[in-house]
Amino acid sequence: MTFRALLVEKSAEGAISQSIQELDDSRLPDGDVTVRVDYSTLNYKDGLCLTGQGGLVRTYPHVPGIDFSGTVESSADSRYKPGDRVVLTGWRVGEAWWGGYATRARVKAEWLVPLPDAMTARQAMAVGTAGLTAMLAVIALEKAGLTPDKGEVLVTGAAGGVGSVAVAILARLGYRVAAVTGRPETADYLRSLGASDIIPRADIADPSPKPLESERWAGAVDSVGGEMLGRVLKQMKYDGAVASIGLAASAAVPSFTVIPFLLRGVSLLGIDSVMRPYSERVAAWNRITTDLPLGMLEAMVTEHGLSELPELGRAILAGQVKGRVVIDPS
Ligand code: NDP
């Protein structure tokens, strides 16, 4: 048997190339569950793996794709049987293990999650790691005490994958959502997802010399990092919480001081989606089926094939992808 995959190769000179190839099943890794991949998706990390950046991929040739949804073809693990619908995110699949940019994948059973009945394989990839992480951020903010009556919630990088899903979930839960974007042309899109206010990136991206600014946000979901995270911390209301997801601008926060923690009781919550325990993944996927309007999800999605991935990988690293990308590998 063979399968179709987007293979990333590295030449002796270090040049990265991508090509679609028909590969023998014997080349699949040594997992215990073989899955027919129905859909995959595109996340920021996929951009890094597709273009050989960030040191995430150590062994070539490599099949990227950090997420996939599909149907079990065979399983050596009693938890899964042929025909089961599954979803996979994280565990360094697509980085250290061949991933979802293929018609077939083989992984460890403990990495899989049963696809919720209320969700199609395509919807699961419209959510993907980006959407799951947005849900984990909202759950973390709730655990920190955030409720809609506390005030407005800020979402940075709002027109991107994590940001779009975060806006939609928060709005659905009854929060007033302010969306920060560097792309003014996405304002109507963000309003359609439920954003009440659109904040131009420039308003909140420049460093401020003050240790604290006027209190504005009860909560925040940040996928940008850098100076923007520094500014957001200074603008949090008393007892507010910021969920830190990403580093689309930078990993460093030059204007960081502990003053918002000490004088306003602000919390900074770290969000990791890659190593989350099984029970938390199942809970988060189930909450997505109720808290993310799946009809609204469709408004975020564009669908592409394997051949378009090299270009899409460059685009997401440049912050040019709007919403979520679904990949049909067939
Ligand atoms: P996207 O590219 O889809 O979204 C990122 C958004 O950030 C862009 O759309 C843009 O939004 C904004 N942005 C990009 N560059 C800059 C910049 N220089 N300054 C300010 N804003 C910028 O990526 P994802 O949503 O998939 O991922 C976002 C981040 O979250 C990444 O860093 C990713 O690695 C991280 N991540 C972390 C996870 C975890 O487990 N912790 C899981 C998933 C993602 P706009 O145009 O609206 O301004």
Image (tube, helix red, strand yellow):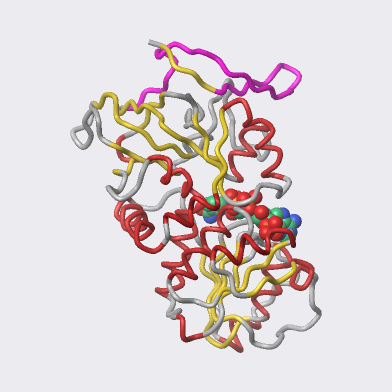
| Percent x, y of residue 81 | 21, 31
| Percent x, y of residue 263 | 61, 89
Q: Is residue 198 left or right of residue 25?
A: right
> Which of the 4 image quarters holds residue 155?
bottom right
What residue is shown at x 57% (from left), y 25% (from top)? 59
Q: Is residue 184 left or right of residue 101?
A: right
Q: Residue furthest left?
A: 78
Closer to the camera in the image, 150 or 290: 290
Q: Is residue 231 left or right of residue 127?
A: right
Q: Is residue 35 above or below residue 110?
A: above
What residue is shown at x 70% (from left), y 71% (from top)? 199
What residue is shown at x 49% (from left), y 27% (from top)? 329
In magenta stretch: residue 19: yes
Q: Which residues are magenta?
A: 6-31
The quarter of the image holding the N terminus is: top left
One can see residue 248 in this view: no
| Percent x, y of residue 80 | 23, 34
One can see residue 240 in this view: yes
> Which of the 4 image quarters holds residue 120?
top left
What residue is shown at x 55% (from left), y 24% (from top)? 62
In magenta stretch: residue 285: no
Q: Is residue 111 left or right of residue 261?
A: left
Q: Is residue 49 above or below residue 322?
A: above
